Amino acid sequence: MKRFVRKFRGARQPEAAGIIITPAGEEAQVDYGAGPMVRDPQSGKYRRTRLFVMTLGYSRKSVRLLTFRSSSRIWAELHETAFRRLGGSPRIVVLDNLREGVVAADFYEPTLNPLFKDVLAHYGVLAMPCRVQDPDRKGKVESGVGHAQKTPLKGVRFESIEEAQAYLDNWEARWADTRIHGTTKRQVAAMFAEEKPTLLPLPIEPFRYYQYGERVVHLDGCIEVEAAFYGVPPGWIGRLVQVQWDHLHVRILDPKTHQLLREHVRQQRGRHRINPEDNPKKMPLTTAQLLARASRIGSHIGALCEQIHRHQGEAGVRRILGVLSLAKKFGVSVTNDACAAALELRVYEYRFVRRYLERQPQLTLKQVDPLIRELIQYRDLINLKTEDNTHERH
C-alpha cells in the first residue's frame, strides 16, 4: 500500500551524498550506540550497555569500548583509552552534539565541555561537532556502530562487562581488522599500518582528571569547594569565577579569559587557604558595616563579633554572619545572653554560641539575685497574714 500511494504523491528525489576523503592521521569520528545486554553486578539483572566507537577516517580502523553509564568524565576517558589503543591520536575528532562533549550546539562556534576540551588539548586533538541533525558527516563511524551491532553482538548476552569487552576485542582483531573494507577495497589492518606512523605521538603522562564548576566569591574573599575555603585575588568579591579541582589542587580561573587567578593545595573540610598578598591591608567597608550592625543588635553580640574578627581576620566574617543568623532564629535576647557567656569564658567561637542555644540551658537561681528576698521578709509576711485571719474570725 505504501509503495502504491507513493507513486501518486510523488516521491522525493534522493540527493547525492558527497564522498569525504581524509588524509592518513587527519581525522577520527566518534559516536555512541546501543551495546549488548550485560548482567549488572549491582542489581543482578541484565542491562543494556552503551557502545563507544572511534573510527579513523583513512583506514577505517575502529576501537570499540563498552560502558554501563555515561558522563562528561567517562566520555573523555573513553577517548583517552581509544588513543592509547591506537598508539597515537588524530588531529581532528568529529562528533555529535551530545551533552557529554558539547555544552551549547552551534555549527560556527560551539561551546565544548571544559573537561572534554582539556583532554583533547592534552593529546593535541581538535574537536569538530557536526551540524545539528546531520549524521551524514560522520557516516564512517555510523557504519562502524552498525557493523558491531549486526555482526558480533546480535542476540548475545554476557555475564560481565569484562567478558563482553574481551569478546568484542577478539572479534575486532580476528574479523574486523582482517576484512576487506567495502569502500576502500583493501584490508583494514594493512591500511592502519600505513596510517599509524602519521598519528600524533602520545604524551608521556595521562591526563589528570578534575571536577569543575562555578562559584561566587564571598565577603571574606574566598570561594568554597567541598567545605574548604580558598582565597581569590582582591577585587573579585561578589563576582563569578570558574573552579577546577582534583585530589591535589584547586585552580581558580577568570570565566571570560580563562586565565589562572590562583592555584591552591587542597585543604581539609573547614580549613582556609589564602595567599599572604590576598589578605586585605585594612578592614573592608562591608566588614565594618557588618560589625556595626552586630553592635546595634546587641551589646554582647557586637562585642563577640569584634573578638571573632580580631582573632580570625577576614576568615571570621562567615562566623559573624552565623552569629547574626542565630539572633534571627533564636531571638536577640537569648542570643545576647549566649554571647555574654562566650565572652565570660573567652571562647570566641560561633560554634559555641550555636551549641549553647541549641541545648537551651535551664535557668538556675543564683545565691544573690534581686528576685530572692531575705528570709525575714517572708517570715513577717506569713505572720501578718496569720494575724489578719485571726481578727476576721473574732
Image (cartoon, rainbow, N blue to C red):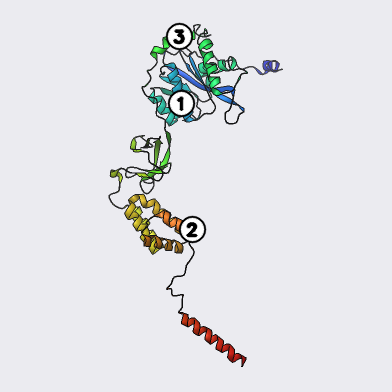
Q: Secondary structure at mark 1?
A: helix
Q: Where residue 217 sits in the image (x, y, percent)?
A: 38, 44
Closer to the chain start, of discs 2 and 3, is 3
Identify the residue under disc 1.
Answer: 77
Which residue in the protein does label 3 denote?
191
Residue 13 seen from this side: no
Dot 1: few (<14), some (14–19), or many (≥20) neighbours within 10 Å? some
Kind of residue at badge 1: Glu
Name the kind of residue labelled 2 in the image.
Answer: Arg
Mark 3 surroundings within 10 Å by alpha-carbon count, few (fewer than 14), some (14 through 19), many (20 or more) = some
Mark 2 falls on what kind of element?
A: helix
Tell me if residue 67 can be seen.
yes
Which of label 2 and label 3 is nearer to you?
A: 2
Relative image position of residue 379 (x, y in whole percent): 50, 83
Q: Name the foreground residue: 35 vs 388.
A: 388
Of discs 1 and 2, which sits in the foreground?
A: 2
Sequence order check: which comes first, mark 1 or mark 2? 1
Which residue is labeled 2 in the image?
359
Residue 234, quarter of picture: top left
At label 3, which amino acid type do we have?
A: Met
